[in-house]
Image: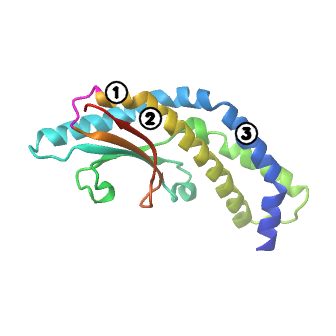
Amino acid sequence: MDRIKDLEEYIKEYRINRFENKRAYLSQYSSRLSSTFQSKLNVLINEQVNKQKNKDNADRIKLIYLCQLLSSSYTGSYEVILGMSNSKLYLDEKKSQVYWYPESIYESIDKDMEEIEKILRKKFIRLQDSELFYIKQKLLYDDWKLLKKVFYFMSIQSVGLILDSPLRKENELLFLCGNYMDNLKIILHTRGEM
């Protein structure tokens, strides 16, 4: 376990630089992902409108959420869940969810891992796959932090799309973000006539 910490410490500066470089392009990531994000959001809106048509007393939408799937780093899909539900969130049987691959955020992960492996091999002998996987998890965590920031900006841009839709909504909409089936954090809330 000490070696893992040594590996992590050895690439600390690389991770910091990588994150800062990616953060410098935050607005570009947001604009590149915006169209796919809004198309996924439209899928959710249309699905919820159809569900609400079929039920007179359907609950109103209160939550829009982005969830990291921890399994996606194992499968290499790097997908997240974008969803919409009433105030019950995970217990809402009528919630809508779609998988979304935010390509701009995760597209460089393989190249970054190649670079890290080169850096580590200069100092460490016989790198194990489990050690490299642990380091990859750290990079993916950095990318997730970046995606949460991008989600905040895209949520602000998408409020009008939601408000102008025929969707039945609560007076307050909450945008949440976090790990799937975990305690999600509120990143944005809107109030107004819905």
Quarter occupied by the N terminus: bottom right
Dot 3 falls on a residue whose secondary structure is helix
The answer to whether residue 45 is left or right of residue 1 is left
Q: CA distance from mark 2 to mark 1?
A: 10 Å
Say which mark, if any, is on residue 20: 3
Identify the main secondary structure in magenta: loop
Q: Which residues are magenta?
A: 164-168
Whether pointer 1 and pointer 3 mark residues with C-beta atoms closer than 8 Å, the reply is: no
- Observer-nearest of 168 and 19: 168
| N-terminal-most mark, 2 or 1 | 2
Say which mark, if any, is on residue 105: none
State the scheme by which the image is colored: rainbow
Amino acid type indicated by mark 3: Glu
> Which residue corresponds to the image point at 63% horizontal and 51% vertical from the top-left?
140
| Residue at which label 1 appears | 161
| Residue at which label 2 appears | 155
- Observer-nearest of 42 and 113: 42
In magenta segment, residue 126: no
Quarter of the rendering containing residue 61: top left
Quarter of the rendering containing residue 124: bottom right
- Residue 99, percent from left and from top: 41, 45
Instruction: Identify the residue at the far right of this view.
Output: 123
Amino acid type indicated by mark 1: Leu
Q: Would you call the spot at circle 1 few (<14 residues within 10 Å), some (14-19), or many (20 or more)?
A: few
> Which residue corresponds to the image point at 69% horizontal and 32% vertical from the top-left?
24
| Residue 32 visible within the image | yes
